[in-house]
Image: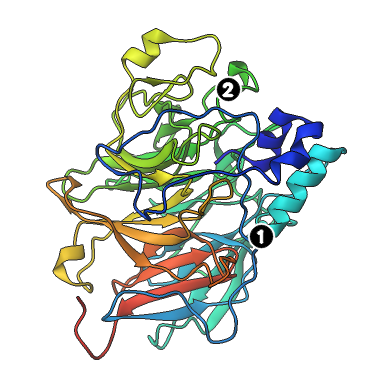
Amino acid sequence: MIPLKSALSRVGPPLAALALAACGQGSADPFAGFGATPQLPPPKSSLIPTLNARQAVGWPPGAAPVAPAGFTVTRYAGDLTHPRWLLVMPNGDVLVSEASSEPAKDKGVTAMIANLLQKKAGAIMESPNRITLLRDSDGDGVAEVRSTFAEGLKRPFGMTLTGGKLYVANDDAVVAFPYVDGQTQITGVGEKVFDLPGGPINHHWTKNVVASPDGTKLYATVGSNSNVGENGIENEINRAAVIVYPLPAGPARVFASGLRNPNGLDFEPTTGTPWTAVNERDMLGDDLVPDYMTSLQDGGFYGWPYSYFGQHVDARVKPQRPDLVAKAIVPDYALGSHTASLGLAFYKADAFPARYKGGVFIGQHGSWNRKPPSGYRVVFVPFANGKPSGPPEAFLTGFLDAKDHAQGRPVGVAVDKTGALLVADDVGKAVWRVAPSPTGTSR
């Protein structure tokens, strides 16, 4: 989604306060705007965005998200500081990156309101800039070992392991550390592998990095510097894209572009094709534009900022680029508007019932700019023959309480060595583990 400060800067200080009361009229259907051919309403361009950030309250004692019948949810680890992304190591250790947006340093009404709203949503603090190691030595589904694995990084987010090296995506570069299986700590800031677009704006600072299944390439995600290019196209070079870096020495190049804010990235198990989850643009209405997941074509262009979901032109963008709109690829599967779909992981294990095999789990962080709120859950979409093959399922819910306060907000998702699903919850300061119940039958 567009950062709150950027949205408010577009309306200006006099209107920013009015935006607090702006109302939307989105669909109450929890799966509105999902599927390969979502219904797209006419755009409702507005200077004043809907602002509906849910108050972050955390989980009360003993509370947890809710999974389908036949599954058990445990708190794998708690008391973390804004956990965002997960990596399961070969020995079963789990690395969790802890990083956050930080308060805007600008002075004035716009920055003040942006800081207040992001604080309300639990999305802003001094970034811990750390990776924590979690280890479940006795196999009970709870990590009893915790240690600081790395610190002093620059808002680390994505992590991947290949060729004896751990690669970490900072907010401005991918860095590498030597790694030996079972290692519990790394030191230093890492060796820079390649740069990623950073400041001075760096609106979408979360960067992911994933190694190809054969270990020959790194793929990194980079979000845009704006909602629809209003900060200047010159500030979008190598942004809104997935970058590929052939190992061991590059060079880095754009693999796919026109992806407003890609985060989750994984490889579909039957075809080996990379898929990504993308946050789409804002301020066209509560039911536009749907976030989505899509397979990626080398050299493919997916529309941003000139169009959305194929050739639907965004009239706000000047100058227009009909040549690019004409070749914009339609995303494979919409994930609902303003759901902030971040995490994406294909289920390649065998612990869950057979219908989950090969499907994908998506962590939906949740809206700040939609009424009613959307997201705040982990959804599952089945796959067959390399493509989505059935209706979506709300797999992990309960992140909003009865008052629509945010007890948690899911971000990264990963599958552990036993086949259980792990979910990073930044507002809930936890990593949740979802596994088949020891008794009873999973549906």
Position of residue 13 measured from the top left corner of the image (x, y, whole percent):
81, 33
Q: Position of residue 441 (x, y in %)?
A: 19, 84
Q: Which of 68 and 187 is in front in this view?
A: 68
Would residue 30 be found to the left or right of residue 354 on screen? right
Give residue 244's quadrant in the image: top left
Above or below 177: residue 59 = below
The residue that appears at 45% across and 10% down in the rendered structure is 321
The amino acid beneath tag 2 is Gly
Q: Report the residue at 59% width, 86% height from top.
A: 61
The picture places residue 103, in percent across and down from the top left corner, at: 77, 49
Q: Relative to 393, is 113 on the left or the right?
A: right
Name the element at disc 2: loop
Q: Mark 1 points at which residue?
A: 122
In the displayed orientation, state which residue is furthest to the left: 385
Kind of residue indicated by mark 1: Gly
Q: Name the residue under label 2.
A: 229
Mark 1 and mark 2: span between their CA atoms? 27 Å
On the rendered image, what quadrant is the N terminus found in? top right
Q: Do the residues labelled 1 and 2 touch (CB within 8 Å)?
A: no
Colour setting: rainbow
Vertical arrangement, residue 194 with respect to residue 103, above or below: above
How busy is the neighbourhood of tag 1: few (under 14 within 10 Å), some, or many (20 plus)? many
